[in-house]
Image (cartoon, rainbow, N blue to C red):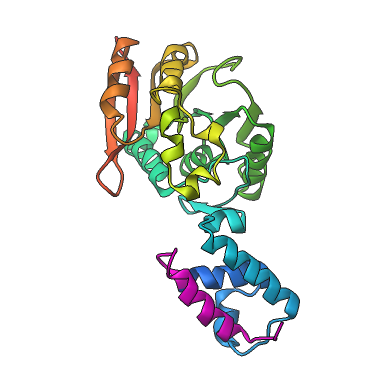
Amino acid sequence: MTTVVLALWLREATTALASVADQPRMEARRLVAFVCGWDAGQQIADPGRPLSLHQQAQLDHALQRRLDDEPLSRILGRREFWGLDLSIDGATLDPRADTETLVDLVLETYAADAAAPSRILDLGTGSGAILLALLSAYPRATGLGIDQSAATVETARGNARDLGLNARARFEVGDWLNGVQGRFDLIVSNPPYIPTGDLPLLARNVREFDDPAALDGGADGLIFYRRTLTEAAAVLEPGGVLAVEIGIDQRDAVAEAAFGLGWSISGQRADLAGIPRALTMVRLA
């Protein structure tokens, strides 16, 4: 293998990444930072620095993974969510920008500081993204995140420690609401909501790199909504709010299920594409 300099590798990688990335130059630089430990400033300041054969081999391997449609966040093991730098692994759902819509809806719901939630429950917490974002926004709140995967819970705990939120965030292995103790002002969830039959139709970068258990919402995609709507009242304070992310074209079906189980829709928010993506619900009087 011939030794190459950084600028040459970046140029060739940027050209190759144009087929899979919206920002190929940025992704190429992030791969260099990941493999070599050189931030963007260092890369710009010294474009002629040579790559060792080991660095070049690692970079080429990472580049090929990306060209094979593996998400950049999976390669780096990190994802930015709502301004927070989070660790992710194979057991955690890759938190996406669409889910920030749910956080934004909660903030809109509790616009007055005096009304801010003090105890938050996050069902299917994954990396802890939603709960940690909300605890960042509400410095007097505490929260509990539940997930069925022990590996995922450890990742969420690590994220809380890294962000200095571990004193207010607790993460436990559990079966949704089964066994949850205490009462909460706010329950949030981005549940699995893809109908089982649609899983093979998902984009490859989702289908092959996200845990199916974090995606599969049962035959109609609504199993976890029904379960939450059935069980949440037992742990939700009077006047409390349930906030959930929903999939494309699920708004009416979730609303119908909610009404049938004693809830009403109190708010909704669309994502950047204009698709209804998050709902808040309250118990019917």
Q: Classify residue 258 as left or right of residue 79.
A: left
User: Residue 71 or 130: which is nearer the viewer?
Assistant: 71
> Residue, x 48% and y 45% (percent of image)?
206
| Quadrant of the rendering where the C terminus is positioned | top left
Q: Is residue 3 magenta?
A: yes
Q: Is residue 35 magenta?
A: no
Identify the image quadrant of residue 2: bottom right
Q: Classify residue 47 as left or right of residue 134.
A: right
Identify the image quadrant of residue 182: top right
> Residue, x 64% and y 31% (percent of image)?
149
| Residue 241 location (% of width, % of height) | 38, 24
Q: 38 above or below 68?
A: below
| Residue 264 location (% of width, % of height) | 28, 18
Q: 22 above or below 91?
A: below
| Quadrant of the rendering where the N terminus is positioned | bottom right
| Residue 82 location (% of width, % of height) | 45, 50
User: Residue 261 or 184: which is nearer the viewer?
Assistant: 261
Q: Classify residue 182 as left or right of residue 273.
A: right
Count of labels shown?
A: 0
| Residue 179 location (% of width, % of height) | 61, 14
Segment tinted magenta in the rendering? 1-24
